[in-house]
Amino acid sequence: MQIACKCGKCGQMFMNQEDDLSIQLDFASQTLSFMCRNKKCNHDNIFDFGGWKKQQKHSPLPQTKFM
């Protein structure tokens, strides 16, 4: 399986085969974190599943109807 991450700040792509990819799945805080390895960037890309989950509860998808 190939895993690739693209930095949200500088746009550089990192792949797992190059041994420069580090992804952290934190189930306690419900976040996914990827630290950009670009020496000039070092941006911490964080995706917050907890915030997304709360937002979905407050604005659920519309109900579907079958005809």
Image (cartoon, rainbow, N blue to C red):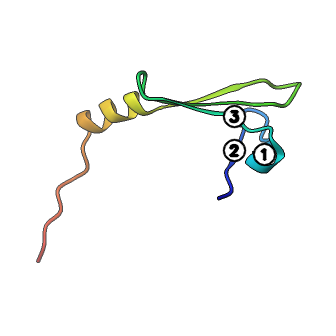
Q: Which residue is mark 3?
A: 22
Which secondary structure, mark 3? Answer: loop
Residue 53 lies, in percent from the top left, at: 33, 34
Q: Nearer the viewer, residue 43 or 55?
A: 43
Disc 1 versus disc 3: nearer the observer:
3
Which residue has dot 2 on it?
Answer: 5
Residue 65 quadrant: bottom left
**Image-based side of 66 in relation to 24, left or right:** left
Q: Position of residue 59 (x, y in %)?
A: 26, 39
Q: Quadrant of residue 51?
A: top left
Asked whether disc 2 touches disc 1, contact meaning CB atoms under 8 Å apart, the reply is yes
Indicate the amino acid at tag 2: Cys
| Disc ID at residue 13 | 1
- Verify CB contact (< 8 Å) between mark 2 and mark 3: no
C-alpha distance separating marks 2 and 1: 6 Å
Hey, what amino acid is under mark 3?
Ser
Residue in the picture at 71% in, 43% down: 6
Callout 2: helix, strand or loop?
strand
Tag 1: amino acid: Met
Q: Which element type, helix, strand or loop, lies under badge 1?
A: strand
Which part of the image, by quadrant, shows the C terminus? bottom left
